[in-house]
Amino acid sequence: MEKIALGSDHAGFELKEKIKKILESLDLAWEDLGTNSADSCDYPDYARAVAEAVSQGNSSRGIICCGSGIGVSIVANKVRGIRAALCHDQEDAVTSRKHNDANILCLAGRRTDVEQCEKVIRAWMSTEFEGGRHQRRVERIEKPRDQEKDWR
């Protein structure tokens, strides 16, 4: 069974708690890596924990929430092997999976209502990576720049 790592800061805490119910309705297991309240905290701690869980293979994918979704996506993308995508709608979710093989979904706790969140998660979880020309591009993301022959 696929396991999803979950994380949030205080601004994404309420949405993260609702995401647990969405994942359960999809018969997906999850692990909550914090935070555990709406008390002010630092989003990098929780974004990094989720990204490392996915990068190390302890979870197959991750979902992280903060107020805007921007901060957690920046932090997660610093971890090797992570392709975190901030998605505001179903189209973003589908594209992030089809074209980028995103393995972490980032959501904006202050902008995403539960109904929209469920649509985004369902689209993101059900969309497969398309491969083909996109595979080459994903491989280039992973390769250090000094190893690229034709980096522009």
Image: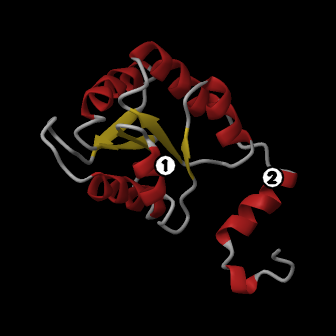
Give the residue displayed 16% in from the left and 40% down from the top.
Answer: 36
Is 151 situated left or right of 43 in this image?
Answer: right
Residue 90 is labelled as none
Give the residue displayed 81% in from the left and 61% down from the top.
Answer: 136
The residue indicated by pointer 2 is 134
Residue 21 screen position, x and y as percent: 33, 21
Give the residue displayed 15% in from the left and 44% down from the top.
Answer: 40
The residue indicated by pointer 1 is 60
Q: Is residue 1 visible?
A: no
Please tell me how crowded label 2 is: few (under 14), some (14-19), or many (20+) other residues with Cα within 10 Å: some
Which residue reaches farthest bottom?
146
Q: Amino acid at mark 2?
A: His
Q: Is residue 48 visible?
A: yes
Is 21 situated left or right of 99 in this image?
Answer: left
Sequence-wise, the earlier of marks 1 and 2 is 1
Task: Judge depth for marks 1 and 2 and give the one in front.
Answer: 2
Mark 2, secondary structure of its residue: helix
For the residues labelled 1 and 2, the Cα–Cα distance comes to: 20 Å
Vertical comparison of 151 with 13: above or below: below
Vertical comparison of 53 with 123: above or below: below
- Front residue of 5/88: it is 88
Vertical comparison of 1 with 51: above or below: above
Vertical comparison of 33 with 82: above or below: above
Q: How is the image coloured?
A: secondary structure
Give the residue displayed 41% in from the left and 38% down from the top.
Answer: 68
Please tell me how crowded label 1 is: few (under 14), some (14-19), or many (20+) other residues with Cα within 10 Å: some
Mark 1, secondary structure of its residue: loop
Q: Quadrant of residue 13?
A: top left
Residue 29 screen position, x and y as percent: 37, 35
Residue 122 screen position, x and y as percent: 55, 23
Q: Quadrant of residue 143?
A: bottom right
